[in-house]
Each structure stands twice: as structure tokens, then as C-alpha cells.
Image (tube, helix red, strand yellow):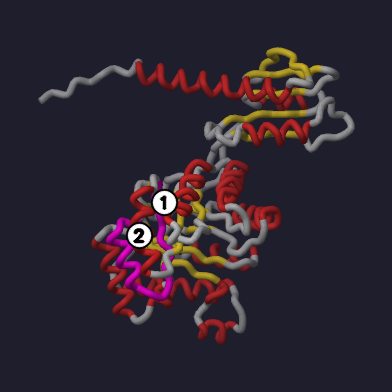
């Protein structure tokens, strides 16, 4: 069935990062991280807006210094979506951004300092109802664990995570989520599988330092896809050496492919062959570029010939089957009209945007027909 996922999510505790629910029955959140200089407020706010427009639910911002904390205050005042502060070593920075309204603190309790400092952060987070994200990374494991295991392993990652969890447990703090990241796909997947069976807190998924746009997208898709298909994961970041906006796009593509979330156009397109009656690749690429602003979910099938075209077009919201000189356009599974192969992109864009407007009008009409309930005083 179209749009249906057969994946059974792992039961987890629901927490709130600002107004975004993480875990439980909440949709899997998609996030990224700014790569601007945090002290450059305008640049950072601009990038956060770009990520928001791309569909980000959350954005993480590195706050390495007190100057960056002061800049974060101004950034937070201008942001429309929840912000996570990424903090290491100096617990005072965590306390400062908490005062400035941060929505979540990403810390490693192990590198914050002695337990009194960790307790100060935990007490502050509790008082202000700010969740914490514990981030364990294969590249920064504790030295004794490196000695014990000889190298990063899934078991080493889990042991590191459990140490941090023990600290939070000692202080009766359970408003947290957790990540276990490595650049190795199988190490990451194995670590998450182990931890998922031991705790009920929500899990943040990612393959860290995955690589460039193409290779990193593939590695992340394999790793996150394995975990998500098993119901593991409540929020994701695709870590790419690329424009952070691409991380959001790839994140949604992964979730769409598993039927876990829908956003934007889902193109069903053939890889093309000598049977194609128009340039499928060029058509799809141009449509993707033109329709990047569309957030509404819609299945659009673009098939270059009549072998698989009719079958795919009948299952899509809008479908196109290639023909000589002109191609046949389907709407809601039914044949509608022929389109000159020279006008395919323009016609498809027009039909897609028209359908979106009709949907919006139907929603507005339905809302307008709702009865007004007079509340008694």
C-alpha cells in the first residue's frame, strides 16, 4: 500500500526539544548542524533559516567559547525552530546557554570535568526542563576503554554510553536522548542494537564523518536504513562533508524510502534505456530543481516507455508514460491527456502545483465548514 510502512518502532520514552517531540509515537525528527562561525550571528541565523526551509525539525549549533555563548543568545532570539547547543569541556558554557533559552544540551559528561560540574549542568537542565543529548563517538572514547578494547568496538561504545547514563541516573535525571556514532557502518549498527535493548530513552542516529555528498549519503543510507528498518531510532542526522541543507534532503529521502515520513515530491523514475521516448534523466533532474520548495507529499511517476509506465502511473498521484512525440499523463491513476515531449517539464510542474493548490483549498474548505462551538461562561 502506498505510503504505508510495515516497520514497528522500538518503544521509547518521549521527551521534548522545544516544541518538537522525540521518541514515543512522535515522527522521527530530522536535524542538521550549522557549520558557520557561531560568533557570526548573521551567517548562522541565515543558515538556520535555510535548514528550516529545507524541513529541519532541529538544528545543532556548536558553542565552544563564552563569546560563542553570547552570540548564541542573539541567534536563539532570531530562530524559529528548536536549537541544540553542542558543548564540550567547559560546563559554564552549558549553564550560560541554558539561561539564554537553549532547547537541548549536547554534552559528554565524561569531558565536562569532575562530578560537581556535571551535577551543576544536570541540576540546571532539570530546573529549566532542558533535555540533554549524550553523544558517544568512536573517535573520542575514554583512554581506559581504548586500552581495554584495543580499538573502538561496539562494546566499547556501549560501555562508554552506560558510564554516562550511570552519572545521570545517580542524579535522578531521565530527560535525555543518546547517540553512539562511528564512521564504520557495522560498528555503529551493532552498538545501537545492543544499547536499544538496554535503555528506554530515545536514540539519535548517525554515521559520523560519513564522507562527501555521494559517498556519505550512501554510507548513511545503509547504516541508518538498517537500524530504522528494525524500528530503532527517534531522530537522525546525516553527517556529510557538504552543505548542511543536503543533510536534511538526504535524511528525508531515507525516511521516505522506508515509509516513515513523507515530505516533498517522491519521484518514481526509470533509470532510462533505449526504449525511452523522452530524456527521462534530464526531465527528472529539472523537475527536482524546480520543485525543491514543495513540502507537500506527492508521488509522481516518470517512466520513459509503455512497458512499466502504465502500471507505475496508475499507482501515483500524477504519472507520465512515454510515447513517440507525446506522452500520456495520468491523474489519480486514470488517463487524462497527452503532453508534447517538448513541454513535459512545464506541464508536469503546472499539474503538480495545481494539485497542491486543490489540496490546500480542500483543507481550507473543510476547516471552514467545521461548526463553531460556543463556550459557556
Say which quarter of the image contains residue 347: top right
First reached walking from the N terminus: tag 2 or tag 1: 1
Say which quarter of the image contains residue 106: bottom left
Q: Is residue 228 above or below residue 314?
A: below
The residue identified by callout 1 is 22
Question: Does the magenta portion include 299?
Answer: no
Question: Does the magenta portion include 87?
Answer: yes
How many marks do you count on the picture?
Answer: 2
Classify residue 255 as left or right of residue 39.
right
User: Which residue is at 62% across, 21% downward?
Assistant: 350
The residue identified by callout 2 is 131
Circle 2 or circle 1, nearest the eye = 2
Q: In the image, residue 335 lies at what x, y percent?
A: 70, 15
Rendered-image quadrant of the N terminus: top right
Q: Secondary structure at mark 2?
A: loop
Is any part of residue 1 visible from this angle? no
- The disc label shown at residue 173, or none: none
Q: Is residue 355 above or below residue 250?
A: above
User: Which residue is at 40% across, 54% downward?
Assistant: 83
User: Which residue is at 77% across, 35% downward?
Assistant: 281
Q: In the image, residue 210 lies at what x, y percent?
A: 63, 61
Mark 2–mark 1 Cα distance, whole angstroms, equals 10 Å
Tell me which segment is drawn in magenta: 81-102
Crowd tier of the residue under label 1, counting other residues whose Cα lies within 10 Å: few below 14, some 14–19, many 20 or above = many
Amino acid at each position: 500500500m502506498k505510503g504505508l510502512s510495515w516497520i514497528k518502532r522500538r518503544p521509547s520514552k518521549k521527551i521534548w526539544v522545544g516544541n518538537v517531540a522525540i521518541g514515543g509515537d512522535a515522527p522521527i525528527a530530522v536535524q542538521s548542524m550549522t557549520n558557520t562561525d557561531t560568533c557570526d550571528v548573521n551567517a548562522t541565523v541565515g543558515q538556520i533559516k535555510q535548514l528550516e526551509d529545507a524541513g529541519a525539525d532541529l538544528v545543532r549549533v556548536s558553542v565552544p567559547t563564552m563569546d560563542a555563548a553570547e552570540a548564541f543568545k542573539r541567534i536563539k532570539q532570531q530562530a524559529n525552530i528548536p536549537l541544540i547547543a553542542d558543548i564540550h569541556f567547559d560546563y559554564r558554557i552549558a549553564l550560560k546557554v541554558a539561561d539564554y533559552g537553549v532547547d537541548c544540551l549536547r554534552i559528554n559528561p565524561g569531558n565536562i570535568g569532575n562530578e560537581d560540574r556535571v551535577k551543576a549542568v544536570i541540576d540546571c537542565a532539570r530546573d529549566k526542563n532542558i533535555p540533554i543529548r549524550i553523544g558517544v563517538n568512536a573517535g573520542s572514547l575514554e583512554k581506559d576503554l581504548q586500552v581495554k578494547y584495543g580499538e573502538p568496538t561496539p562494546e566499547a561504545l556501549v560501555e562508554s554510553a552506560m558510564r554516562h547514563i550511570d552519572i545521570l541516573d545517580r542524579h535522578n535525571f531521565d530527560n535525555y536522548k543518546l547517540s553512539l556514532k562511528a564512521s564504520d557502518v557495522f560498528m555503529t549498527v551493532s552498538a545501537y542494537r545492543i544499547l536499544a535493548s538496554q535503555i528506554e530513552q530515545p536514540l539519535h542516529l548517525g554515521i559520523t564523518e560519513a564522507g562527501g555528498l555521494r559517498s556519505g549519503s550512501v554510507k548513511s543510507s545503509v547504516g541508518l536504513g538498517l537500524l530504522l528498518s528494525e524500528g530503532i531510532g527517534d531522530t537522525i542526522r546525516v553527517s556529510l562533508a557538504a552543505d548542511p541543507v543536503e543533510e536534511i534532503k538526504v535524511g528525508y529521502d531515507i525516511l521516505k524510502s522506508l515509509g516513515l515520513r513523507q515530505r516533498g515530491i517522491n519521484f518514481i523514475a526509470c533509470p532510462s534505456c533505449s526504449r525511452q521516448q523522452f530524456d527521462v534523466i534530464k526531465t527528472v533532474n529539472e523537475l527536482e530543481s524546480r520543485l525543491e520548495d514543495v513540502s507537500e507529499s506527492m508521488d509522481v511517476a516518470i517512466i520513459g516507455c509503455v512497458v512499466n509506465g502504465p502500471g507505475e502511473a496508475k499507482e501515483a498521484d500524477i504519472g507520465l508514460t512515454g510515447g513517440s512525440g507525446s506522452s500520456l499523463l495520468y491523474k489519480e491513476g486514470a488517463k487524462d491527456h497527452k503532453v508534447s515531449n517538448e513541454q513535459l517539464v512545464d506541464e508536469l510542474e503546472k499539474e503538480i502545483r495545481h494539485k497542491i493548490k486543490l489540496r490546500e483549498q480542500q483543507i481550507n474548505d473543510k476547516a471552514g465548514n467545521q461548526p463553531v462551538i460556543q463556550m459557556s461562561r
